[in-house]
Structure formats: C-alpha cells, structure tokens
Amino acid sequence: MKTLSANEIDRKLITSVGIDIGTTTSHLVFSELVLEKNPWSRSRKYQIVERNIKYRGKIFFTPLKNENREIDLELLLPMLLKEYEKAGIDLSTVDTGAVIVTGESARKENAETIVERLAMESGKFVAATAGPNFESVISAYGSGAVEYSKVNDCKVIHTDIGGGSSNIAVIESGEITATACVNVGSRLIAFNEEGVIIRLEPAGMEILEEKEIKASMGDSLTEEEKKKVSETLAKALIEVLEGKTALSTLAENLMMTQKLPEESYQGDLKYSFSGGVAEYIYGHEQNNYYDLGRYLGERIVYLAKRRKFKLIETKEKIRATVIGASEFTLQVSGSTTYKSSEFTLPVRNLPVVMPHIKRDKLSEDYVASQISNALERFDIVEGETPLALAFQDPVGIQYNKLKIFSIGLVKALGNTIKNGYPIILVFDTDVGNSVGNVLYRETEITNILSIDEISLKEGDFIDIGEPIIGNPVFPVVVKSLVFES
C-alpha cells in the first residue's frame, strides 16, 4: 500500500460537472477543483483554492415534449452524454456536480431522474429546481456580479436575460438584498431558417396583440415587426429596472414575481447583464439565432443609454447560470449542539436558506419576517419541504433574547411544524445548544436539530450524519454551488 505524503493528504484534486437545463437551452461545464485542508480548522474541512475549467460544452436547445411543458429526457440524456465523450471524461471519473433545472417546479422530477442516470453514486450531485427568484440568485453569482459588488463595495442591479425570462438581483456590497423576474426573453417567439414561427409563448402572443400584429404558429414576421416586438419587450424590462412607481399594464402583466422594493433603487446604481441576450448588449455576438435576441439586445442598450444607466460588464454572459460544480466539504460541528430525541439522522440534500438577522433589530415579528423573506427569495413555500435555516451570529446567549429569537422562529414555521417536518438550525457561532434548549422549553417543539460552528451560504445543500466524537458532534457534508471566481 502506498504511503501518502503530508502534501497529498492536505491537497485533493476532484473533477466536477455543472449541468444547466433551461427552458430554452442546456449546456454543461467540466472543471478541476483543487481542495486544500485549512490548517487552522478544528474540523476536517477542505476548501476550494483553485478552479480550472477543463471543458465548456456546446449550448444546445433543450428538447421538450407535451406541448413544451416537459423536458424530453430520452432526447436530452444522449446530448449530455455526447458532451462527456467530447470532453474525454468518463462518468465514473466525475467526483461531484450540480444539475440545475430552471422553469416550472414540476420539472424537479426531471432533475432527479437525470441525477440518477448520470451519477455513479447516489448523492454525489445536487439537484435543484430554480424558480424565478432562485434563478436570479444563481445568475447573479455565476455572472460575477456579486463578486464585483463585493470587491468594489457598490450597489449593482444585475439582470440575466434568457430565452423566456429576465431574472433580476439587487446586490449591495456583495449581498443579494432583493430579487425579481419579468417575462422578457429572446425566445418568446422563435423561428425556423425560413422565418416561420415555430415557438410562440403566451407572453409573446400578448406582445403581438399589444402591437396589433396578427400572427400565430406557422406564420412569419417582417423585420419591422420583430423590431416592434423587441422594442416593446425592452421597454417593459427597462421600466422594471429603473424603478417606475407605477408600471404600465403590460409590464405588470409580464411580472413573474413581486416588483423590487422601492429601496432597491436608492443610492448610486450600476447595472450589469448576463444571459444569451447579454452577448448582444456588450457586442460579443452579431449572429442571428432565429429568435429576438439581437433585436432585444440592441433596444436594451439604446434605452439604457438614454436613461443614463451606468453599465458594467461582468465575466460571464450566456453561461452565468451554469453551475460549475457542487463542492464536497466535510465540516464537523462544534460540541455545543442540540438534538431532540425525536430527530432522526442522517438527513440528506437539505437546501440552505439564510435569513439575515441583525441583533439590534431583534423582535419576534422581525425574526419571522426575515425568515419569510429568505424563503421567498428561494421560491420555497414554507411547510412543503424540509430545509435548513442557517444564521450568521443572529443572537447572543442572554435568555430573553434567545426566547424572542425562538418564538420568532415558530411564528415563521407554522406549516413546517404542522406538517411534521423538523426544525433544522445551523449557526456559525457557538449558540446551537442554547437556541435548541430554549426553543424546546419555551415552545415545546420536540423535533429539533440545532448545530453550530458550521459556515454556510445561500445556495448550499447539506447532508448531516450520525454524531461522531461523542454524541454532541455532527459531521456535515456541504455541497456548495461553485461559481467562477
């Protein structure tokens, strides 16, 4: 048996794949991740220190069936496997990865099926369905807009414009504070090589009616009509981005989420774009792909300049929502944790939701509202699925403060408790045991796991195993969505 050197033990190379399955297009990316053990960590924690993209896959149209309502797996899987072959990568050599399906929540089943067919070991992939708000978060990170905002300590409104929607995120000094989505995209109307309409989404039909253009599937549009439709879509998007108090009827109808809050538009704003249309906005693409992309990009640039938007360019455009991988990071909780007798382990693939709690604002209603806001940000309906709530130093160890925090939790998680799901709490400080005990004493909730000294971020998924090193210490596998740094 080979004896490993200290350097080999402290450093690992893993192969990861990110697969983005969109309503319009799909593609994947293979990366090599370099993990090194943190010498200052008290746990067996590895961190990514380098990411090298080895292969950027072809962007192809997502095959759909049942009148474009469902992904056709029988056609999609061979396309994905062909990309493995082109990259020279065997399924068995992939260590980890993420499959993200955007669009309707019903496609979650598709995502899980794809994972089962591609992964050599169960649980090696994160599978998530990205609703409009979550997709806004993903694209903001993947584009580099969050990093730009953090490094430059500025406020950025980032928009990812894809085939069917524009996903918007407000980022303040590296923190996403609000999200929204509007039904503006390049393939609401799409054509074949002869210019015949082969795809017409409801929003596209609404725009045709707005402009009094009589056309349907099998018809054609003139160049002037394509420009009119794109102008109308661009105006609706710009209305949302500039923060008009009262949106036009059309813009209101195209909103897929709530509007951004008024405070989103306060301060010195910068604007950035990603997605396929961004390639046209920044002048990186001129070709016509038989949709509205080129026309839409041109009109957005024109209107943005007229309104004197401060445009910045981030690193990624069309591949912003491609998830590079899901890193595996084994962390060990601190010893001051709390597990109720009813809580059963292990638990797997819990989405991490991170409410932003400020100590100086602590009240029962404030805690409850911040949890509700965080759930909405990830398109999660409270009480429909188990999840983990992660907090960054939200409360001290004073009993009255812990009581306020605990009652606020219960106010926000009424359906979770009613439906028999556990309350799973993760803290980066050593208050896990204190919160768990007070929560049990003050509310009589009996299905609780409250662990501490684990660092998480929004977009993570976690597995929690049976306790080790004595009963209070739990191993946590963190599967983080990894973005280009």
Image: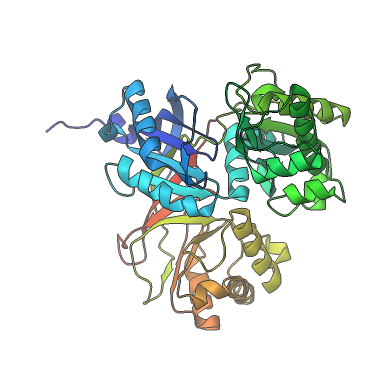
Q: Is residue 346 above or below residue 292?
A: below
The reply, left or right, for residue 308 in relation to residue 376 is right
Residue lying at 52% horizontally and 71% vertically, measured from the top left = 416
Q: Nearer the viewer, residue 199 or 76?
A: 199
Q: Quadrant of the N terminus?
A: top left
- 358 on left or right of 27: right
Left or right: 412 in relation to 447: right
Residue 81 at x, y = what percent? 34, 31
Q: Position of residue 365 (x, y in %)?
A: 70, 71
Q: Is residue 173 left or right of residue 447?
A: right
Closer to us: 447 or 67: 67
In the depicted structure, whether residue 403 falls above or below residue 66: below
Q: Residue at x 61, y 48 (%)?
A: 132
Query: Quadrant where the C terminus lies?
Result: top right
Q: Along the line of sight, which residue is nearer the eye, 422 or 334?
A: 422
**Residue drawn at the location 68% of the way across and 66% of the way down:** 369
Find residue 412 and report its image quarter. Answer: bottom right
Q: Nearer the viewer, residue 183 or 177?
A: 183
Any part of residue 39 in sight: no
Image x and y of residue 143, in percent = 60, 32
What's the coloring here?
Answer: rainbow
Residue 98 is at least partly visible in this image: yes
Vertically, is 363 above or below 251?
A: below
* Residue 135 at x, y percent in the picture: 59, 44
Number of numbered discs = 0
